[in-house]
């Protein structure tokens, strides 16, 4: 409870509302617990016209200077952890029962909002394999890069849209990729998203950032269209087919993957960085992983790194941190600063 106190204090100013199920804000200062963010930065919240499996509207957040001049460089930032499924779905209560990510159900709005604020270093996350201090958001803010951060409540590794063919058997829609696409449109200033930012964005300084499963959102968006100046991925399983190579070890993971990629193993390569000759790979690529990460088989990175290295125009900044850690940029400010300055923004 002690770590919640910094969140509860703004109640006195009427900015925060904390109830039994969720956290609602309109605007709050960007003040991580354990990192020092630049002064004058705020986080604003927006509602999307997408429904989470629990029937609540999904959220999107924007982090930027409260006062600004001119168009802002902007990163569309996709959080980690968005993978979950109910073992035996029930039509009467589709998100109740045994599930993959137990005890932390990741198919509701509450979890998605809390994960965004954990990513920002402003909420105490209970994920034992990830340490979130807000390091990467702080590193971006230090370079003046605003952030658009959708909250994924669908547990679909940011892959599915409203036409998800498995919705009939799961009894709810998964719309992670729809959420990611809206966030990208918001960052590009496209009309019709329902989100009106109080600042202009610079389309020539548009970046994609993904941690863990969030990296799949970035690569799937790149598969659809070019335009990003750079991409930063940390601990993303780019080649998902690796899981099928060892079904005895990854059986439960494969079950979830087949709920999301209903066409099976052969369809998971759509929207990956390892597709040879992908013309949409940005000029700047920061690729962080750990060969000792228990969540992501180390071989899942090989094809992506080989393909990126084979594109002469691409500046590849690669780091194997070789520690038993997942999404290290979430809690290592030195690594995060290095990845942003010398990888994502290098040119």
Image (cartoon, grey):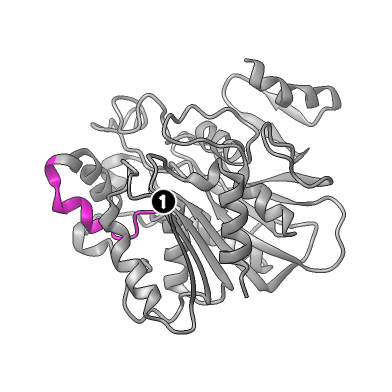
Q: Whole-percent x and y of residue 158?
A: 43, 53
Q: Residue furthest left?
A: 248
Residue 133 sits in quarter = top right
x 66%, y 16%: residue? 2
* Residue drawn where x is 64% and y is 29% of the image: 23
Magenta-colored stretch includes residue 68: no
Task: State left or right for residue 185 relative to residue 256.
Answer: right
In what quadrant of the picture does the C terminus appear? bottom right
| SS assignment for the magenta stretch, majority | helix
Q: Position of residue 100 (x, y in %)?
A: 30, 33
Q: Nearer the viewer, residue 130 or 61?
A: 130
Quadrant including the N terminus: top right
Identify the residue under disc 1. Answer: 235
Q: Please tell me whether residue 204 is drawn above or below residue 266 in the rendered image.
A: below
Write the start and end of the magenta stretch as one range. 236-248
Considering the numbered disc 1 on the image, is that residue within a helix, a strand or a loop? loop
Camera-side residue: 11 or 131?
Answer: 131
Looking at the image, residue 238 sits to the left or right of residue 342; the answer is left
Q: Residues within 10 Å of mark 1 (few under 14, many from 20)?
A: many
Residue 61 visible in image: no
The residue located at (27%, 43%) in the rendering is 256
Q: Is residue 85 left or right of residue 264?
A: right
- Does 19 appear above or below 41? above
């Amino acid at each position: 409870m002690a770590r919640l106190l910094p969140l509860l204090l703004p109640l006195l100013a009427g900015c925060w509302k904390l109830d039994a199920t969720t956290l609602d804000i309109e605007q709050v200062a960007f003040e991580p617990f354990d990192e020092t963010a630049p002064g004058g930065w705020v986080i604003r919240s927006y509602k999307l016209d997408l429904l989470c499996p629990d029937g609540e509207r999904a959220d999107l957040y924007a982090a930027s200077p409260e006062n600004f001049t001119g168009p802002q460089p902007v990163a569309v930032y996709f959080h980690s952890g968005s993978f979950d499924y109910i073992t035996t779905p029930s039509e009467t209560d589709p998100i109740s029962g045994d599930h993959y990510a137990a005890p932390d159900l990741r198919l509701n709005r509450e979890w998605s909002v809390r994960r965004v604020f954990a990513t920002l270093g402003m909420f105490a996350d209970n994920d034992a394999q990830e340490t979130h201090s807000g390091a990467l958001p702080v590193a971006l803010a230090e370079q003046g890069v605003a952030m658009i951060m959708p909250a994924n409540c669908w547990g679909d590794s940011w892959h599915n849209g409203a036409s998800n063919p498995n919705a009939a058997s799961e009894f709810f829609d998964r719309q992670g990729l729809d959420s990611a696409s809206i966030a990208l449109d918001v960052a590009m200033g496209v009309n019709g998203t329902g989100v009106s930012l109080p600042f202009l964005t610079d389309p020539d300084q548009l970046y994609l950032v993904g941690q863990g499963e969030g990296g799949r959102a970035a690569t799937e968006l790149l598969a659809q269209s070019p335009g990003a100046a750079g991409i930063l991925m940390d601990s993303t399983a780019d080649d998902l087919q690796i899981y099928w190579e060892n079904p005895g070890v990854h059986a439960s993971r494969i079950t979830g993957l087949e709920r999301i990629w209903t066409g099976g193993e052969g369809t998971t390569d759509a929207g990956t960085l390892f597709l040879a000759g992908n013309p949409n790979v940005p000029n700047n690529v920061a690729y962080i992983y750990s060969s000792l990460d228990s969540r992501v088989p180390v071989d899942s990175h090989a094809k992506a790194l080989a393909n990126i290295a084979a594109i002469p125009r691409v500046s590849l900044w690669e780091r194997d941190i070789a520690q038993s850690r997942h999404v290290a940029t979430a809690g290592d400010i030195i690594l995060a600063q290095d990845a942003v300055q010398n990888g994502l923004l290098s040119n």
